[in-house]
Amino acid sequence: MLAVVKTKPEKGVEILDRPMPVIGNDDHVLIKVEACGICGSDVHFYEWPLEMHLETMVIIPRILGHELAGIVESVGRNVVGFKPGDRVVSETWGGCGFCYYCRLGRFNHCLHQTRIGQQVDGAMTDYVVVPYFSLYKIPDEVNSEEAAVIEPLGVALHAFERCEFKPGDDVIIIGPGPIGLLAAQIALSGGAANVGVLGLALDKERLEMAEGFGAAAINVEEMDPYEAVSELTRGLGADLVLDVSGGRNTLSQAVRMAKRGGQVVLVGLSPPGEFNSTELIAREVTVHGSFRRQPVTWLRAINMVTSNVVDLSPLITHTLPFSDAVQGFELLVERRAIKVVLVPGKS
């Protein structure tokens, strides 16, 4: 089967023939992949910037991909609740259920994670094996390509679970990528008074999409971002700033854009940068980290999609076969795509 494989600690991936995986654990399930999105972290793995020390995150060689939607092909002997033919999406590990953090209910901090597409082979191929407790069923009305975007929707949704977002809040989102655009939809559907999305000139299409959702587009290369945020928030600053950009020094920017007593949620993975805490302390801004999702996040995200609270379809600008994965990565690197979804055998 064709697979998108990271083979070397340098820029690029290879399209290779790989054997079909087999179930080697009674708690595991074999999934026939219907669609797999290219995540921002996958783009990092593709580009391989040395300052991010990605060798600590992904074991090479590795089939990439964790934004998975597919059909259950076969199940291990201990699997309950899933059978061949079920349409599913998958968490990237699921949590062991027994370690300290899992017993606290913080499954996203499990001490025994085996993340697909990083520590074990992922879903940019025809078949992938995952633990059954990582799976969530999806209804027939959600197509597989959109279902593959439920994982990043969960990332955006968990950011709101981590803070105290309230109807009537002013929300600023730094970064108009898929997670930022999904966060804008969540904020607007949750009753935000004003939502602003910050991006660069290269993000013109993405900023236009944010405007289409009802947010204010702020091109930081054409206007002073602080003045734009001040105008949008009546001179007070934002109640909530979400940094999903992964920029080097955007934490300082986010803190400055928040009002006194406001909140900042950091979502994007960024290289090391500098930060002066004086403004954060003096203005009593609360900073939250947000790391992936919880099981309940998946359930909420699926409900949001099936209830049409959010619309995933506009974000999917390109659907490509696994054989054209390099083209998909380059489209994202050059910001000529918003969301690229890879599918088996599509031409």
Image (cartoon, rainbow, N blue to C red):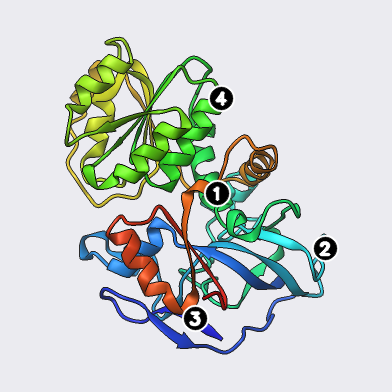
> Dot 1 corresponds to which residue?
313
What's the distance in space between the residues labelled 2 and 3, CA to CA?
29 Å
* Contact, mark 1 vs mark 4 (Cβ under 8 Å): no
The local secondary structure at tag 2 comes to: loop
Which three-letter amino acid code belongs to the residue tagged 1? Ser
> Dot 2 corresponds to which residue?
80
Residue 173 coordinates in the image, percent (x, y): 37, 33
| Residue 193 relative to residue 260: left or right | right
Residue 277 appears in the rendering: yes
Which three-letter amino acid code belongs to the residue tagged 2? Val
The image shows residue 150, relative to residue 263, as above or below, that is: below
What's the distance in space between the residues labelled 4 and 3, CA to CA?
39 Å
What's the distance in space between the residues labelled 1 and 3, CA to CA?
25 Å
| Residue 132 relative to residue 236: left or right | right
Which three-letter amino acid code belongs to the residue tagged 3? Ala
The local secondary structure at tag 3 comes to: strand
